[in-house]
Amino acid sequence: MVLAFVLARIDTRAVKISTTGNFRVFTPDLTNWRQLFDHLPDTVFFAKDAAGRYLAINETLARRCALSDPADATGRTVAGLFPAKLAERYAAQDATVLRDGRPILERLELHWHSRGRAGWCLTTKLPVRDEHGQITGLIGISRDLRAPGETHGIPQGLAAAVEHLENHFMDPVTPGLLAKLAGLPAVRFARLIKRIFRISPVQWIAQTRLAAAAHLLRETDRSVAEIATACGYYDHSAFTRAFRSATAMTPTAFRKNS
């Protein structure tokens, strides 16, 4: 979670982008990030332009895509690197980030590794904006939770619980409901969430709601009361207390400072 924590706090508006030929390329600042992730064999790093074409990937992703050089991915899309079903899912994720500016944070996924082996990872994708606030691309990481092929430690059903929370955080959601969707006893479910996300199921639910609220405060003009309701808080004051506890700012102050 530390890597995603750091990445999620990068001011992506400060990532400079220039144009060379047909593809946009990042300046050396982002190249340094790629080189940093080259030293993390359990993490893939990628940067894409507004059309979803790769601008940079690290050595780990190149190796898993059977590329001899990371530069060979430049200008290609996920359709040219991954099996059709995976490519379709990745492209849909990218479209959401590029279209709506809504980041993907610590999403639990089963990824395809080299030689046909599967492995669990946590994926984070963030929009990159220019000085005018326009989305010009995205950057992201996917961090392995276990070695490729060792999927038995994380039940398949857990991904269903993760997806349900991401899509229904505005509805009444409880740890018990998510455990049931995962097909796990509540105690085991809580242990797994603690191991993967380093927080309890209750904190995980709250974090998901507050992350959605922060996005709406930054990206829309909706009132604080509307955002509170849209993120599962049916008491405006309860939302304000929870948000201030997590960010040290009221929702209004957060909006003004974003």
Image (cartoon, rainbow, N blue to C red):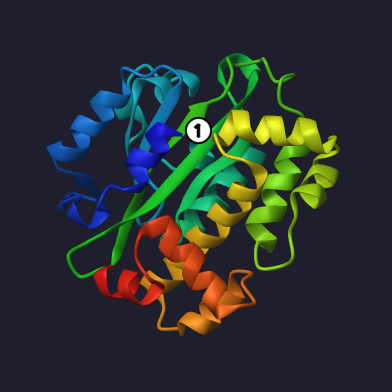
In this rendering, position of residue 45 left or right of residue 207? left
User: How many marks overall?
Assistant: 1
Front residue (pair 165, 49): 165
**In which image quadrant can residue 151 be found?**
top right
> Which residue matches tag 1?
81
Image vertical order of residue 45 relative to residue 257, above or below: above
Front residue (pair 160, 81): 160
The image shows residue 90 at horizontal and vertical percentages of 55, 45
**In which image quadrant can residue 51 be found?**
bottom left
The image shows residue 226 at horizontal and vertical percentages of 54, 83
**Neighbour class for label 1 at 10 Å: few (<14), some, many (≥20)?**
some
Secondary structure of residue under mark 1? loop
In this rendering, position of residue 231 left or right of residue 215? right
Image vertical order of residue 30 relative to residue 155, above or below: below
Q: Residue at x 60, y 14 (%)?
A: 115
Quadrant of the drawing holding the C terminus: bottom left
Q: Residue at x 47, y 80 (%)?
A: 224
**Looking at the picture, which amino acid does disc 1 mark?**
Leu
The image shows residue 166 at horizontal and vertical percentages of 63, 55
Q: Residue at x 52, y 83 (%)?
A: 225
Image vertical order of residue 36 relative to residue 197, above or below: above
The image shows residue 104 at horizontal and vertical percentages of 49, 51
Please indicate, yes or no, whether residue 47 appears anywhere in the rendered image: no
Please indicate, yes or no, whether residue 187 appears anywhere in the rendered image: yes
